[in-house]
Amino acid sequence: MTKKQSVKHKTISIKEIKLRPQISKHDLDLKIKQIKNFLEDGNKIKVTMIFRGREIMHSSIGKGVFQAIITELSDKAAIDHKGRLEGNHMNMMISPK
């Protein structure tokens, strides 16, 4: 790789945002604002929702929170993976448009 090619490269890092399904509206707005800042910097975001105990039985609440994030970021971001449940975590990948 020549020096010109290496100068044009931009490293993209993955930032992680962790949530709980019982997040309040204000806290969710702050997390969305933080996601928007990461997207403006050109980073990918991994949103992780952690279920504890019996919260896993109500995974539809977590999907509703993810849907709220998707609708809020629909103009600035592309959703790579929608909410996938893996064990007691639900993950979603977001990348800038």
Image (spheres, rainbow, N blue to C red):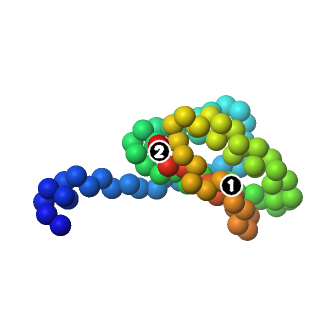
Closer to the chain start, of discs 1 and 2, is 1
The residue at the point 67 percent across, 31 percent down is 26
Badge 1 marks a residue whose secondary structure is strand
Q: Which amino acid, by three-letter code, is at mark 1? A: Gly
* Count of marks placed on residues: 2
The residue at the point 64 percent across, 58 percent down is 91
- The answer for how far apart the CA atoms under marks 1 and 2 are is 17 Å
Rendering quarter of residue 84: bottom right
Residue 92, which numbered label? none
Q: Which residue is label 1 attached to?
A: 83
The percent position of residue 62, horizontal first and vertical second, equals 75, 49
The percent position of residue 28, horizontal first and vertical second, equals 65, 37
Asked if residue 66 is positioned above or below residue 29 in the image, the reply reads below
Asked if residue 56 is positioned above or below residue 33 in the image, the reply reads below
Asked if residue 18 is positioned above or below residue 37 in the image, the reply reads below
Residue 96, which numbered label? 2
The percent position of residue 38, horizontal first and vertical second, equals 46, 43
Q: Which amino acid, by three-letter code, is at mark 2? A: Pro
Asked if residue 85 is positioned above or below residue 21 in the image, the reply reads below
The N terminus sits in image quarter: bottom left
Badge 2 marks a residue whose secondary structure is strand
Q: Visible in this render: residue 46?
A: yes
The percent position of residue 6, horizontal first and vertical second, equals 20, 59
Rendering quarter of residue 42: top left
